[in-house]
Image (spheres, helix red, strand yellow):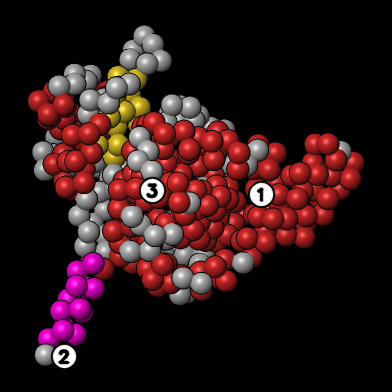
């Protein structure tokens, strides 16, 4: 009997590690958000689109155009269909959100959520989120294993899905598709991360999800972000691409959000989606980086602890009204990033 119980536990753990399918969740979200009051939000099931694809690009564009009309009653043009095709081919493994705008106004025609189409197991999903691939892994050797112990595959995949959905619910920060300002993108990412944590805590009762995600985001900043900004061989289309470690350094707002998620009022309340959005917005406004602090963190990743602290201490001494708060914030964030192992070992 003990052997059978042990075997059942092992099978359960293995199935959790090897697969988690978001298909049913995508269907539920489409039912909920296709008729969103502001504009339709379309959550794509990439398997469905990919099943329609053939070798001929023009035929694929026709198939996507027909699919959008028959499934969502949305008429799209050639270029919109081509964009959707890209997210199911060259960008299939990425998780993204993209607003499609009306031709002669800034109003949204619809907003598209493209979940990752990668068929990843637990370790592979951690690698995808951390940006690890065969030729690039700047992390300590046990990082992936430790993160799999921190966050389940279900938590990782649902958070990714709801993070992108949250971009489509964002009425303030979501960047224009051509935006290149790193701080602007950082604010949009902060909002999406906060709203996703709020929704998931309510709908799935994930425990400590904000703190756990703060560790994941901190690891990316400390290792991958530092590598990207220092790597002179990396060719980028715009400067913010070199600042990805700061753009996705979402830990500070997540740590503050944890207080809300743990509070009695939040746990017992029945907040509407608009109320959750307001909480996320307020937390981002109060605790996300200012543009000046954003640049200070970028300087730390590029030039190191001593050089960046020396520079901003001098800035603070000469212009305390402009730089003293930035200097204090820089010291605080360096302490957090240096302390990640302690926090990771606490879970």
Residue at image mark 3:
268
Q: Position of residue 71 (x, y in %)?
A: 12, 29
Residue at image mark 1:
297
Q: Earlier in the sequence, mark 2 or mark 3?
A: 2
Q: Position of residue 5 (x, y in %)?
A: 16, 84
Left or right position of 222 against 149: right
* Nearer-the-camera pick, 210 or 161: 210
Secondary structure of residue under mark 1: helix
Residue at image mark 2:
2
Q: Give the alpha-carbon distance from disc 1 to disc 3, as whole Å.
A: 37 Å
Q: Residues within 10 Å of mark 1 (few under 14, many from 20)?
A: many
Q: Quadrant of residue 96?
A: top left
Secondary structure of residue under mark 2: helix
Determine whether 266 is above or below 226 in the image.
above
As drawn, which residue projects farthest toward the top? Answer: 104
Q: Give the alpha-carbon distance from disc 2 to disc 3, as whole Å.
A: 40 Å
Mark 2 vs mark 1: in front: 2
Q: Position of residue 195 (x, y in %)?
A: 42, 41
Q: Earlier in the sequence, mark 1 or mark 3?
A: 3
Residue 31 seen in the current view: yes
Residue at the location (47% across, 65% down)?
Answer: 137
Q: Which residues are magenta?
A: 3-16
Marks 1 and 3 close (CB-CB < 8 Å): no
Left or right position of 36 against 299: left
**Residue 286 on the magenta segment:** no
Mark 1 vs mark 3: in front: 3
Q: Residues within 10 Å of mark 2 (few under 14, many from 20)?
A: few
């Amino acid at each position: 009997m003990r052997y059978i119980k042990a075997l059942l536990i092992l099978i359960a753990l293995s199935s959790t590690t090897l697969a988690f399918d978001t298909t049913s969740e995508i269907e539920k979200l489409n039912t909920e958000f296709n008729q969103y009051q502001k504009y339709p939000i379309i959550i794509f099931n990439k398997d469905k689109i990919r099943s329609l694809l053939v070798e001929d690009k023009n035929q694929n564009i026709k198939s996507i155009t027909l699919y959008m009309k028959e499934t969502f009653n949305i008429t799209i043009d050639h270029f919109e269909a081509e964009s959707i095709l890209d997210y199911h081919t060259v960008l299939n493994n990425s998780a993204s959100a993209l607003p499609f705008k009306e031709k002669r106004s800034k109003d949204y025609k619809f907003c598209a959520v493209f979940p990752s189409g990668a068929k990843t197991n637990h370790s592979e999903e951690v690698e995808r989120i951390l940006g690890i691939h065969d030729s690039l892994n700047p992390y300590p050797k046990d990082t992936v294993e430790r993160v799999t112990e921190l966050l389940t595959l279900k938590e990782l995949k649902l958070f990714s899905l709801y993070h992108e959905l949250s971009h489509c619910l964002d009425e303030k920060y979501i960047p224009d598709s051509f935006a290149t300002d790193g701080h602007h993108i950082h604010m949009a990412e902060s909002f999406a991360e906060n709203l996703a944590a709020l929704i998931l805590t309510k709908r799935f009762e994930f425990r400590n999800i904000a703190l756990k995600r703060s560790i994941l985001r901190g690891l990316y900043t400390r290792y991958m972000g530092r590598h990207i900004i220092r790597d002179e061989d990396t060719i980028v289309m715009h400067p913010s691409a070199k600042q990805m470690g700061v753009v996705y350094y979402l830990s500070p707002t997540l740590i503050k959000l944890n207080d809300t998620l743990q509070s009695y009022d939040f746990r017992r309340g029945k907040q509407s989606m608009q109320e959750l959005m307001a909480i996320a917005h307020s937390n981002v406004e109060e605790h996300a980086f200012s543009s000046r602090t954003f640049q200070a963190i970028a300087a730390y990743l590029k030039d190191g602890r001593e050089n960046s602290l020396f520079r901003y201490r001098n800035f603070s001494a000469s212009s305390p009204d402009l730089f003293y708060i930035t200097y204090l914030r820089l010291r605080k964030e360096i302490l957090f990033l240096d302390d990640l192992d302690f926090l990771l070992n606490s879970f």
